[in-house]
Amino acid sequence: EEGQNSEQAEFRAAHQPATIASQPEDETASGNGLGYGSLPHPDEIRLSSNHPLDAGLDPPSTDQNPDLGLAVASAVTGDEDPDFVVMAIEFDPDAKPPLHKNRRFRAYTCLAFSITAVILVLVVVYVTASTKGTQIVEQESYYQADPTSQPSLSPITERQRSGIIEQLQGGVLLRNETFREMSEFDPRMKALDWILHANSQQLDSDDVNLYQRYTLALIAYNFDSDSWYYCPSSPMHSNDKCDVPYGDGLSKTYGVWLSGLSECEWYGVTCSADGVVRAVDLIQNDLIGTIPHELAALNSLQLLAFPYNCIYGTIPSEIGSLRHLLSLELHGNVLSGIIPDSMYDMDKLQLLNLANQYGQNRNCTSSSNQVIDMKYKFGGLAGQIEAHGLEGKLGASLADFRSMKGLYLQNNALTGVIHEDVGNLRYLRWLFLNDNFLEGTIPEKLTKLKNLRKLLLDENFLRSTLPEDMSRWRDLEILTVNGNSMYGSIPLGLYNLTKLEMIRLDDTRQASSPWNIDPDEGFTGTISTRIGQLQRLKILLLSNNPLSGTIPMELGSCEELSNLRLHNTNLSGTMPMSICLLRDKNLNSENNEGVLYADCRPNNGTGEPRVQCDCCSDCCDFTSRVCIADD
């Protein structure tokens, strides 16, 4: 704009009407006698006494005939040549002054010049303003990319000549791409055509919402909005609005995508008071396709959520440039590839959910009747290659999420270790790393996470003990380490976590591939009588561990228990009556599910059972590991 204003200033200066300088009063008027300023002082006026014409002249008479005309005397200064006499000029009282000396003529002429100048300036301002967007784009896109051998798009309409194409090309495409390289079926070209011709708002190249409206239009075309479950951009919504139901027969009205309404009214879009898009939330809406990297043009986004759709492909690295993003939710799709390194620079991110990128047993059907099968990589479009989710190694980079509160990466194919620096994420509350291929130990420094509420590390390749100082997790509600090669005793600090609702220490003694059988695997020792302090406990699974001793009667104080599994262990004795009494409370079989398991079947089919239990829902044989419902 500064460059443009300077150009306008120069243009205006070059076209201003010339200012006519008035002749100074002390100049001599050429051609019409002497000017007033050239006259000497009256005292200096004299007649030359030695001039031949002096002799015999009488003073002029006061009663001279007025019709005879008047003579104008010339003044002669003392330094002039005495032999030179200026000729007198006859004065005609009826004569009119020349036109250019007429005061009225001069006034009208100046007024005409002024009006002409004003009109010229207005024309210049209008022309400059109408081409301002194009000038700006030319300056910005001049250095965008090297020239190509392909010709540029031929302007067809005024809209195409308005600078919109260049503006979007330089500010949204982001990878030095050009529209001329794209086919007409490319979602980006479809979005461009909509902006140029179908968009009823008819934005200009310098409109502040051009980028965001185009980017949202691209989302619609890229994710096949005609097939969306809620508010599809199909002709069925002739009034540009749709109703979305929610609870108890209620509904809310939203704008349809690609409608003439403001993009801030479209379903799932939230804007701030200044009209800037801050959130795009399209949960479970049958979105089909890959994530466009042009999303990064929505650089004020704070929430981006596409969970439980049919999105395949990789996560574009450009998402890492969304530095204002607080929440990124892409779980429940069939994404593959790695987590881009650029994402670890998103230091404001508080919630990252990339979970469940495999095992989705559902399909989506596009508007062209193409089926996307979520069991397969790329939705089955590249063949029936089984999906495994996101890959790559985790490590110290996780600690770069300084503001992170919820990290959900479960059900993927991630490898690496849980780095001890993760313990520096002081705001972290939810850490879900289960169902991956992580190795190593559970770092003792994780106990620095004083705000931790849920820690899920199950179904990995960890070989570790529980941290000794785990009593620092005062707010912990869920702890799962099952399905790993755990060993050692249960730390006493566990029994101080009185907010615990679920403990899963089961299946840590593995007996099948890919884990190797190790006699040292599994938790050893006894169950402390202090377990009765965990009165919020609902689920306690300790099966498939070499725990020994008896079942403490204090466990009966955990009246919220709804699932208790103590089978395939070395526990012995009799099931305490305090626990059997819980069968009349929450520890029941109303859902026809086993709720209380113990090794109460004859060992190896003939021997004495390890535990005597008259109230167990399922009794197991320790040797054969066969459990049979006994209710």
Image (spheres, helix red, strand yellow):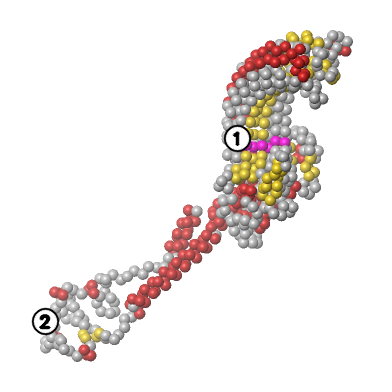
Where does the magenta region start and end?
Answer: 326-332
Whole-percent x, y for residue 553 in the image: 72, 11
Residue at the (60%, 45%) spot, across then down: 271
Q: In this picture, is 4 found above or below 342?
A: below
Whole-percent x, y for residue 537 in the image: 69, 20
Question: In front here: 416 or 584?
Answer: 584
Whole-percent x, y for residue 193 in the image: 67, 55
CA distance separating discs 1 and 2? 109 Å
Residue at which label 1 appears = 349
Amino acid type indicated by mark 1? Leu
Residue at the (11%, 82%) spot, across then down: 50
Whole-percent x, y for residue 97 in the image: 31, 81
In the picture, measured across the screen, residue 296 lies left or right of residue 355, that is: left
Q: In this picture, is 591 found above or below 134?
A: above
Residue 331 magenta: yes
Answer with the quarter of the image where residue 155 lies: bottom right
In the picture, measured across the screen, residue 283 lies left or right of residue 102, that is: right
**What secondary structure is found at the residue carrying circle 2?**
loop
In the picture, measured across the screen, residue 240 lies left or right of residue 26, that is: right
Q: In this picture, is 217 found above or below 446?
A: below
Contact flag, marks 1 and 2 (Cβ < 8 Å): no
Residue at the (86%, 9%) spot, across then down: 607
Numbered circles on residues, count: 2
Amino acid type indicated by mark 2? Ser
Question: From this viewpoint, is residue 456 visible?
Answer: yes
Residue at which label 2 appears = 49
